[in-house]
Image (cartoon, rainbow, N blue to C red):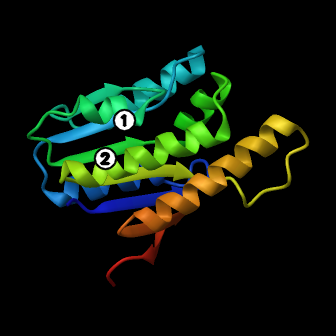
Amino acid sequence: MGKITFILGGARSGKSQYALSLARESGAGKVLFIATASAGDREMRLRIARHKRSRPRGWRTIEEPRSLIRALKRAPRNTQLVIVDCLTLLITNLMLEGHSDSFIEKEVKSGFKLLKEIGCDSIVVSNEVGLGIVPENNLARRFRDTAGRINQAAARMSNEAYLMFAGLSIKMKGEK
């Protein structure tokens, strides 16, 4: 059974870069990167292109904005490490598609169970969305609440958890 490392932090806190550095340090040769972003506008297309350039060329990427399970089922058998970047984009995509909170939570929890069953280590990235003000509209509050519940479940299901601030990691869970 593989180890799951969970990386949580605010926007531009260094989560993705930290995930990449952990993956490089792991020594895994066969890395699968599951990208959950959708390129809905020019700025997002540029952001995605920048993220792609930051990954080693030998890593395989699966772009799957709506189903962690579907992406994991496409993982090559010889995969040594999986990176999922990021849960909050997955949540957003499913929410905007009209799925219920319970469906979204079940999808992510089932994805975590599958990560454990695959047997290789994994790194999962998510945004901390509960440190700001209470959003003024229902959809934003629903997103914050759902992401918060999913992040709590992800932290429980993970072997290690880190919180990122200003590019610095704080270990919250796991061996010292």
* Residue under numbered circle 1: 69
Residue closer to the observer: 115 or 90: 115
Q: Residue at x 36, y 61 (%)?
A: 5
Pick the quarter of the image with the C terminus: bottom left
Residue that sits furthest to the right in the current view:
136
Disc 1 residue type?
Ile
Q: Is residue 128 visible?
A: no
Q: Residue at x 12, y 56 (%)?
A: 27
Q: Mark 2 near mark 1, Cβ–Cβ under 8 Å?
A: yes
What is the secondary structure assignment of the residue under circle 2?
helix
Q: Residue at x 60, y 15 (%)?
A: 41
Q: Is residue 67 visible?
A: yes
Where is residue 33? Give x, y as percent.
30, 37
> From what the image shows, is residue 35 above or below residue 7?
above
> From what the image shows, is residue 99 above or below residue 176?
above
Q: Residues within 10 Å of mark 2 (few under 14, many from 20)?
A: some
Where is residue 82? Give x, y as percent.
26, 45
* Disc ID at residue 136: none
Count of numbered tags: 2
Where is residue 62? Give x, y as percent.
31, 27
Q: Is residue 173 left or right of residue 99?
A: left
Compute the Cα span from label 2 to label 1: 7 Å
> From what the image shows, is residue 45 above or below residue 102?
above
Residue closer to the observer: 77 or 166: 77
Q: Is residue 57 left or right of residue 88?
A: left
* Disc ID at residue 114: 2
> From what the image shows, is residue 10 above or below residue 48?
below
Q: Is residue 147 left or right of residue 65?
A: right
Residue closer to the observer: 166 or 132: 132
- Indicate the quadrant where residue 132 lies: bottom right
Q: Is residue 108 left or right of residue 55?
A: right
